[in-house]
Image: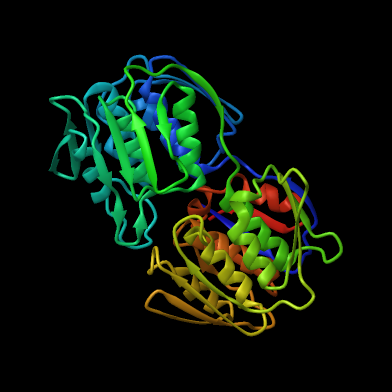
Amino acid sequence: MDKLIVHGGTTLKGSINISGAKNASLPILAAALLTADDVIIRRVPDVSDTNYMIQILSALGAEVERSSGTVRINAANIISDAPYELVRKMRASICVMGPLLARLGKAKVSLPGGCVIGDRPVDLHLKGLRAIGAVIDMEGGNMDMSAPDGLTGDEVDLRGKHGPTVLGTDNLMMAAVLAKGTTIIESAACEPEVVDLADFLNSMGAKIEGAGTRRITIQGVEKLHGVEHTIIPDRIEAGTYMVAGAMAGCRENGITLNRVNQEHLEPVTEKLIEAGHQVKFNDAGNSVTVKPGSEPKGCSITTAPHPNFPTDMQAQFSSLFAVTPGISIIEDTIFPQRFMHCAEMTRMGADMQVDNGKAVITGVEQLSAAPVMASDLRASAALVLSALTAKGSTEISRLYHIDRGYEHIDEKLLQLGANVERVRE
């Protein structure tokens, strides 16, 4: 098992390229199951979650070739049973349900695993698939699905307790593209990753309208064909490095991130500027430079579904606010339990009070190095950010959490001038 040692106090400068979006890659890889033709997907990040998904596709019988960031998939001969030993490792593996059901008329998928950040039920996935004709039996931790009368379009409301479901929207959209008639998804997730999946499916011959809004309309087609597609930039990886630039960037030139999408980063950009930092995009909106502000100040953040502030960025802003003068407040309405990083950051000297889905953070002058443990993907990123400016050398264990979603984070930090090393525990 790897751990990351971060020697704090170095100034970040230079530029890096942002990887393709993990959360767009996973459903798009799964969607390759919808056709017997070759599918080529570019800029698939080399992270453990995409590696697991590729293993799942191979276990289902697909032929998969990977070269750098390009993946070629041929799913001409596939089976309907997704193996438990792979599915249990990653929550997003659940998005093979929709494509298998649509293509084969049946699917058997274990209840998935993933990081522990509170209640993440699959009820909405099942509600959506049942609405268009799926019969689902739950037995022994498996979801056994069939469509004895075929899939038929219907109107489905996917509103959940904490807002729309991204993977649930993805799953229903993938199943509905081969269903008879029209499916309408109300209260759909409208994240950029959902739009990227819809663009991918439409380029395969699907008829999807409204992706990026709360109402998606899918007109079923008989067959999809092969396609080449490039994954959108990872807005959460970009946002994480933007926070790194605000915390530890060179005051004169900051750090520059290439291959970004300005529109996807608006909520993060607004909060960094509100907190007193400098953010400047190029005219094309695909490159951004972030510099620390001379008079940073605390502010308040409330997470909410896109286009509002993403829950996947609140932990990273906790790190920023921990060393920002004044009081900051972060409330997570999506995953109220998602504050496990705060206990570890308190060990580093942060002043954080967490109660009922809200963190009140009083900025301190500097954090101190301490051995800390990653508890989930974004919490890991927060600990790395805190360690960059902390006094001394911080050891972050359970690095496999961060490897789920950040491509070569140690190499990219080294490229920016950080003093980090990956070692075996």
Name the spot of residue 75 as percent of width and height, x first. Answer: 38, 19
* Left or right, 295 with reference to 101: right
Name the spot of residue 340 as percent of width and height, x first. Answer: 44, 69
Q: Residue 26, located in which quarter of the rendered image?
A: top left
* 142 is higher (above) or lower (below) than 320: above
Nearer to me, 60 or 97: 97
Please indicate, yes or no, whether residue 29 appears anywhere in the rendered image.
Answer: yes
Q: Residue at x 56, y 38 (%)?
A: 46
Q: Residue at x 21, y 24 (%)?
A: 105
Nearer to me, 425 or 95: 95
* 423 is higher (above) or lower (below) than 315: above
Q: Residue at x 32, y 25 (%)?
A: 220
* Left or right, 236 with reference to 311: right
Name the spot of residue 100 as percent of width and height, x first. Answer: 29, 28
Q: Residue 325, located in which quarter of the rendered image?
A: bottom right
Name the spot of residue 243 as percent of width and height, x first. Answer: 66, 62
Nearer to me, 201 or 239: 201
Q: Residue at x 21, y 28 (%)?
A: 151
Q: How many marks?
A: 0
Q: Residue 67, located in which quarter of the rendered image?
A: top right
Please indicate, yes or no, whether residue 87 appears anywhere in the rendered image.
Answer: no
Q: Residue furthest right?
A: 252
